[in-house]
Image (spheres, grey):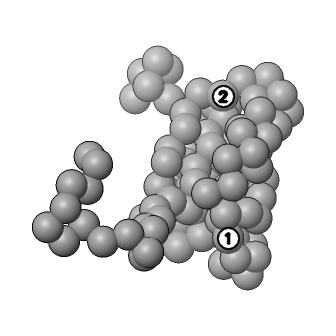
């Protein structure tokens, strides 16, 4: 892989990194040498994701909050950029749905 495409030494923020695809992505990026900032809602699975990254030799930092908290999200991204002097990749993996909204027969606003 060319240096231009390498994530070694890069800073990556990823939302929804406590399970599934998010967990696999952070573990892989950590193994490739990225500094990975993990974010999720639940502490126990987030700590497992952090341990996975560090277990493959990567650097990880975790934050616990809900992705719908815009102020917390903005502060987290800013902290990653300030602490590492850069923000190279942002992966928006977290999903949410407003279960109080029905799209049946209506315009989903997309």
Residue 26: mark in rendering: none
Q: Which quadrant holds the N terminus? A: top left
Regarding mark 1 in the picture, which secondary structure is present there?
loop
- Residue 37: percent from left, percent from top: 70, 48
Residue 41: mark in rendering: 1
Q: Is residue 79 left or right of residue 7?
A: right
Asked where in the image residue 26 lies, by quadrant, the reply is: bottom right
Q: Who's the residue at 79% across and 23% down the image?
A: 85
Q: Who's the residue at 53% across and 73% down the image?
A: 19
Q: Which residue is mark 2?
A: 87
Asked where in the image residue 84 lies, by quadrant, the reply is: top right
Whether residue 31 is visible here, answered yes or no, is no
Q: CA distance from mark 2 to mark 1?
A: 22 Å
Circle 1: is it few (<14), some (14-19), or many (20+) Cα within 10 Å? Answer: some
Most extreme residue toward the right is 83
Q: Is residue 16 left or right of residue 87?
A: left
Regarding mark 2 in the picture, which secondary structure is present there?
loop
Whether residue 86 is visible here, answered yes or no, is yes
Mark 2 or mark 1, which is nearer to you?
1
Q: Is residue 15 left or right of residue 65?
A: left
Q: Who's the residue at 45% across and 68% down the image?
A: 98
CB atoms at circles 2 and 1 under 8 Å apart? no
């Amino acid at each position: 892989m060319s240096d231009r495409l390498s994530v070694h030494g890069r800073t990556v923020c990823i939302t929804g990194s406590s399970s599934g695809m998010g967990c696999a992505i952070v573990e892989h990026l950590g193994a490739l040498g990225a500094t990975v900032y993990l974010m999720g809602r639940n502490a126990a699975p987030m700590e497992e994701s952090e341990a996975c990254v560090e277990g493959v030799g990567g650097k990880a930092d975790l934050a616990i909050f809900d992705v719908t908290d815009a102020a917390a999200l903005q502060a987290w991204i800013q902290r990653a950029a300030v602490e590492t002097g850069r923000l190279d990749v942002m992966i928006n993996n977290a999903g949410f749905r407003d279960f109080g909204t029905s799209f049946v027969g209506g315009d989903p606003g997309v």
